[in-house]
Each structure stands twice: as structure tokens, then as C-alpha cells.
Amino acid sequence: MTSYAIDPPEIPSVPVAGGDSRFPVRRVYCIGRNYAAHAVEMGHDPDREPPFFFQKNPDNLDASGEFPYPPQTSDVHHEVELAVALKSGGTDIPLERALDHVWGYAVSLDMTRRDLQGEMKKMGRPWEIGKAFERSAPIGPFVPAETTGHLSEGRIELKVNGNVTQEGNLNQMIWKVPEMINYLSQFYELKAGDVLLSGTPSGVGPVVRGDRMHATIEGLGELDVVVV
Ligand code: MN
């Protein structure tokens, strides 16, 4: 048995729907600007330029149903996204084999300190401080692909306090899930436990303490998160 110098931290994990097992998380890759209407609202050209990714930390995923308003910001935005869990991986995964590596799907939120992200963009610096903070990725339980089938279309929506703020369809993704897996595997070795956040439709906006977010993805499920 390995002897650790300090008590090892817990393995980050997300509940699995309809059981008491959990999905262990290794890495979290997030794609930027993957719905044309969202690229436009952020001031970018929606043309299909190569995809780009950033990472959140595995322990940023949080299934508690509460999102604590983070420090050092006054402009936190919601981004509703389809999360994809991998059961296996590799390098140079061909497009036609990509979905073989998918274990399941979840409804998630890529919460963003938009003011800090904006400053980093201006200075040409990395986005971590805007994206990869404590509990920055509220997530629902992972549902096995065996149950849902692979999700390539279906309504994706976010309501804040009962009003629809974001809406779109999974079929509007510029880079589809198999393409993301294929692309990422050319730069990284993907492995079991990796999670992909697949981008957000238009309508992102700020939340404040007390707001209730209700995210739904057709054919998958719902996620309720209160800002505290
Ligand atoms: Mn996002």
C-alpha cells in the first residue's frame, strides 16, 4: 500500500442517477463558444474556427444544489451545459469510435466570474481565475448513456426565478461531442473519469444571491441550484 506524506484528498466524484454509486472525476475539459448565437453575444465571429478548451478542476464539480456566490467578483454568469462523462480514453481517437468512450451525461452549469474573465482576456492571460474557482460547476447526477442514448439533439434551457434566460438545442453545437473527443485526444491522453462540458447556448447573464436556477436538457433531466 502506498504511504502518503499527508492524508490523501478525497477523489472528486458526482452522483450517478438512480443508485448510490458515484462517478469519479479525473479532469474537466470545457469548450468555449460552441453555440453560434453565444459566440455572437460574446462579440465573436460564429464561423467555424478551430475549437478551444479550458479546464476546470475536478473538485469544482458540485452536486449539492447550492452555489455559493464567489469572492472577488461582482458579475457571476450562468452557462447551462451538457456534461459528458468518459469511461475510457486514449490518444488520436477516431471520430467514428469517439462515442464508444462515453459513459453518460449530466446537466451542468459553467459558472463564470465574467468580470475577471474579461480582464484576463484583455491582458491575454489564462482564464482560470474566471472559470476554475470553488464550486464553479454545479452538476446533476450522471445518467448512463445506456439509459438516455447518445444525446445529439434536444432542447437545452435555463430558467432563473422562473424566467427563461437561456435556450437552445444540442443540435446547434458547432463542435459535436464526437468531434470534441476526437480533437481533445489529439492534444491530450483522455482517460476514464474525464468530463467534458460542451458549451452554452446564448442568453448568459448574471445571478445574485437568492436566485433559483432551473436547468433542463430534453431526454436527460433537470438541475436545480440556488445561489447562496
Ligand atoms: Mn461555458
Image (cartoon, rainbow, N blue to C red):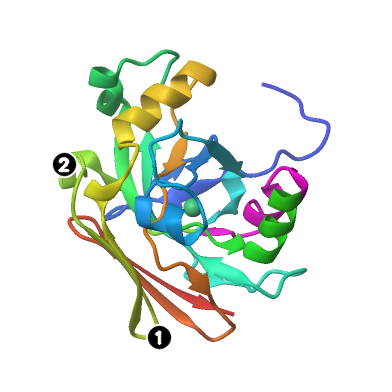
Amino acid type, residue under disc 1 in the picture: Asn
Which quarter of the rendering shows the N terminus? Answer: top right
Whether residue 141 can be seen here: no
59 above or below 101? below
Are the residues flagged by discs 2 and 1 in contact, CB closer than 8 Å?
A: no
Q: Note whether ligand 1 is within 8 Å of mark 1.
A: no
Residue 182, by quadrant, is: top left
Front residue of this view, candidates 226 and 218: 218
Q: CA distance from mark 2 to mark 1?
A: 30 Å
The answer to whether 28 appears left or right of 9 in the picture is left
Whole-percent x, y for residue 3 in the image: 76, 25
Residue 84, by quadrant, is: top left
The answer to whether 74 appears left or right of 181 in the picture is right
Region in magenta: 123-137
In the picture of the structure, the residue carrying the numbered disc 1 is 161
In the picture of the structure, the residue carrying the numbered disc 2 is 149
| Magenta region, main secondary structure | loop
Residue 127 on the magenta segment: yes
Residue shown at the point (32%, 36%) measured from the top left: 177
What kind of element bears circle 2? loop
